[in-house]
Amino acid sequence: MQATNLHVVDQILEGMEHQLLAEYVEEERTPVQSAIMVSALSQLWIFGLYELLRSWRSRAESIIRFSESLQGKGTQERGDLIAAKKRQIETAAAPANNLVTRWPVFEKATSDTGFVGQLQSAVDGSEILFRRLATLRVTLAKHEIPQDGGYALAPGYGRIDQSTGSIYWEVLLRNREVDILSRREIANEARCLGEDRTSAILPRHIQEQISRFPKFSYHLRLAKVTLKSGRQLGKVLVFWNKIVVGALGPRRTPFLARDVVALEQDAEPQPRTEDGKL
């Protein structure tokens, strides 16, 4: 229902954005009243999408953790854990009498490893959108720099994207980094959440290793990876410990993140002079 509601409002907002852009072009200045309306509704839509993703990811991760808690357990202990989880969900579901809708996914996770794997891939695949959305939400709702506590840059102030009419915001991050997001960009990315992104997602044990590396920037870490073939690649950029988003330096041959078998911390690149030399 929440996804449907967001879709309906997105369609309404898209029409308003097209109209806002038309007014902007015709008047050759910002149509203030229209911009205020689109900006206000855009912010509320952002909050709604954030809460939807946060709730879905939280529930998906609880199913994954439950499945992991059963691994390596004997028959008796495994049965006890399943029974305890069912009692917990039954208690939580009792006021709404909806155990029939809450328990089946946990029950499926006890025997279907493929289902749990698909769920993990879906959570990992939503990482970039959710993290960027979360930083925007902190700026708009709390007027703070994400994970910093400092004052945000012009919180709530949006500009008109001159290609779509959508409102976009500049999000100040730590160390004076800035992310720029438009509502249209976020909506388009949300529509792609069902796409298979497993080729860019690192194996779980590799994710745990890279989480201990120092950050290259607000959300990136830098690593030297070893592939199954034995080939090594340096200065690979990994977003939030999970997703390979590129590599620094000359153009590299593409590789599958799932083929990474080992990694080590890579040195931060040296600054370049104006002529491009180190």
Image (cartoon, rainbow, N blue to C red):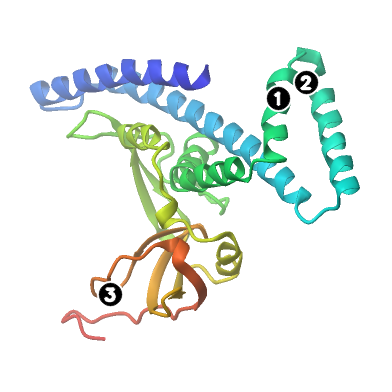
Residue 28: x %, y % from top left? 10, 27
Which residue position is annotated with label 3? 249
Residue at image coords 46%, 16%:
5
First reached walking from the N terminus: tag 1 or tag 2: 2
Q: Mark 1 — residue?
A: 102
Residue labelled with disc 2 = 93
Q: Which residue is drawn at 40% across and 22% down?
A: 40
Q: Indicate whether 18 appears above or below 167.
A: above
Q: Is residue 125 left or right of residue 68?
A: left
Residue 48: percent from left, percent from top: 50, 26
Lateral position of residue 138 relative to residue 40, left or right:
right
Proximity of marks 1 and 2: CB atoms separated by less than 8 Å: yes
Q: Which amino acid is tagged 3?
A: Gly
Quarter holding residue 251: bottom left
The answer to whether residue 217 is seen in the rendering is: no
Nearer the observer, 47 or 149? 47
Q: Which one is in front in this view, the residue at disc 3 or the one at disc 2? A: 2
Can you say whether 44 is above or below 121 in the image? above
The local secondary structure at tag 3 comes to: loop
Mark earlier in primary sequence (1, 3): 1
Residue drawn at x 50%, y 67% as measured from the top left? 215
